[in-house]
Every structure is written in C-alpha cells, then in structure tokens.
Image (cartoon, rainbow, N blue to C red):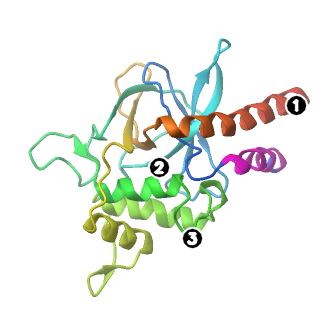
Amino acid sequence: MRKTTLFLVILILPFVGSSAFADPVDPSLNVKFGDVPNRPNPGGPFFVLQPVGPGGAWEVIGLSMCVEKDEYIVLGAEYAVDSILQGATEGGIAGEDPAGGKYDPLSNEAAWVFYNFVTGHLYGGIAALSMSSAQYAEIQEAIWCAENEQACSTNNGTYVNPVLAAATAAVAGGWVNNGKVSVLNPISLDRTTQKQSQLVLTPEPSTLLLLGAGLFGFAAGSRVLRRKL
C-alpha cells in the first residue's frame, strides 16, 4: 500500500506547480474525499474525487481543506454536492453570520491560506503534495483560527502560527479573495445530513491546461496499478 501511494504521488508531483489543482468541482455530480500522504488527524488536506468520463470512474480533480471542526466526512464515502458558495452553510463552532442564520461567510484570511497552499506559495514555495505532516497541521490550524473555529496564540499581538500571521498581514495589505477560493458544502446522499464543508479553488481559464496535464498523469498511473492488482 505504501508503494502504491508513493508511486501515485511521484506521478502527480511533476505537475503540481503554481496552480495544478484548480478543483473544477461539478455541483451536479457526487463527490468523495481521499487521504493525502502525511495528512495529520484531525484536519486536511484531502483529495477531491468525482466521476469522470463515459465510464464514470472516480478520479482526483483537486485538493480541499476543512472549514469547520464540528462536522465530519468519512474518507471514501460518497456525498452529494449541496452547494458551492462563498461560505459554509452550517456555520461551524463559532463562525455563524452575525446577521443571523447558520451561513458563515468565508474570511479573506482563510481563503489566502488555502489559495497559497494549493498554488505552492507557502514555506518558500513547497508544492502542495510535498509538505510534511507538521506543515499540513499548521495550515489547517491557520484556517480554523481564521474561521473562528478555535483560538490561536498571539505574541505581542502577532499570531504565533506563521501561516496565519502571513495571511493577516496580506489581508491588511489589501488581499481580497474575489472568488479565488470557494466553499464546497457536501451533504448525505439522502440530503438529510450536512457534512463538513471544504475549501476548494475556483478554476481560472489559465489554469485548466495545467490541471488537465497533472490529472492525466494521475489517471494513467491509476490504470496501470489497477491492471497490476
């Protein structure tokens, strides 16, 4: 199993550059989430999978990170896509809209963290799938802190978490999400239970060719492995 995971990661890594995982999630199709090597527990990142092509084979289309801490997903389970919005529909632990209701708008700080994670601009330019478990944990913590899902330590007013500190500085300097990052809100197939909302990138036309090249490598490797198993 370790050899299989390593082989797939090696296939993907050459294509994971500044914007390889653009997450073009189709809201009309169901979705699954898969384990990323070195992923900490709790938290992400996760592979996002949807059925692709005439045969409907499940293939990786992108990466995601958790928005809330009080909802959950089961890896490999199939969910419907309730919505793709600029916020979480169930609000999370402490992030409900001050105007009322459960909808929790996505903060610019959380969007900055996820955008720079997937596009490979954190930790000096480390690719999203080349990070350590500690780095993934730090990124997930920064997102949860930005979304008021948990408290984060400060030192003289500056966040101890360096990723959150960088996000706060970037937003203070004028960085705005403007739809680069969206929130995927999954729901059970019978549409009775909301599942843990996930951050995904909103695809840009200039990134789709890179995405296609990267996922072609992943799909080709998957077919080779299936023939061998």
- Mark 3 burial class by Cα count in 10 Å: few <14, some 14-19, many 20+: few
Residue 21 lies, with reference to residue 147, above or below; the image says: above
For the point 54% across and 40% down, which residue is it?
207
Q: CA distance from mark 3 to mark 1?
A: 38 Å
Q: Along the horizontal axis of the image, is 23 left or right of 34? A: left
Q: For mark 1, what is the residue?
A: 229
Asked whether the beta carbons under mark 3 and mark 1 sit within 8 Å of each other, the answer is no
Of the two numbered discs 3 and 1 on the same chain, state the one appearing first in sequence: 3
Q: Which residue is mark 3?
A: 124
The reply to whether the magenta stretch includes residue 154 is no
Dominant secondary structure of the residues highlighted in magenta in the image: helix
Q: Nearer the viewer, mark 2 or mark 3?
A: 3
Residue 159's quadrant in the figure?
Answer: bottom left
On the question of residue 216 being in view, the answer is yes
Instruction: Kindly report the distance in space between the C-alpha atoms of the residues bearing marks 2 and 1.
Output: 30 Å
Residue 26 left/right relative to 37: left
- Secondary structure at badge 2 equals strand
**Mark earlier in primary sequence (2, 3):** 2
SS of the residue at dot 3? loop
Q: In the image, 179: left or right of 113?
A: left
Answer with the quarter of the image where residue 130 lies: bottom right
Q: Name the residue nearer the viewer: 82 or 195.
A: 82
- Image quarter in which the C terminus is found: top right
Amino acid beneath label 3? Gly
Q: Which residues are magenta?
A: 3-15
Q: Nearer the viewer, residue 4 or 86?
A: 86
Q: Position of residue 123 (x, y in %)?
A: 55, 70
Residue 99: percent from left, percent from top: 8, 45
Q: Residue at x 69, y 46 (%)?
A: 15
**Which mark is first along the chain, 1 or 2?**
2
Q: Which residue is mark 2?
A: 65
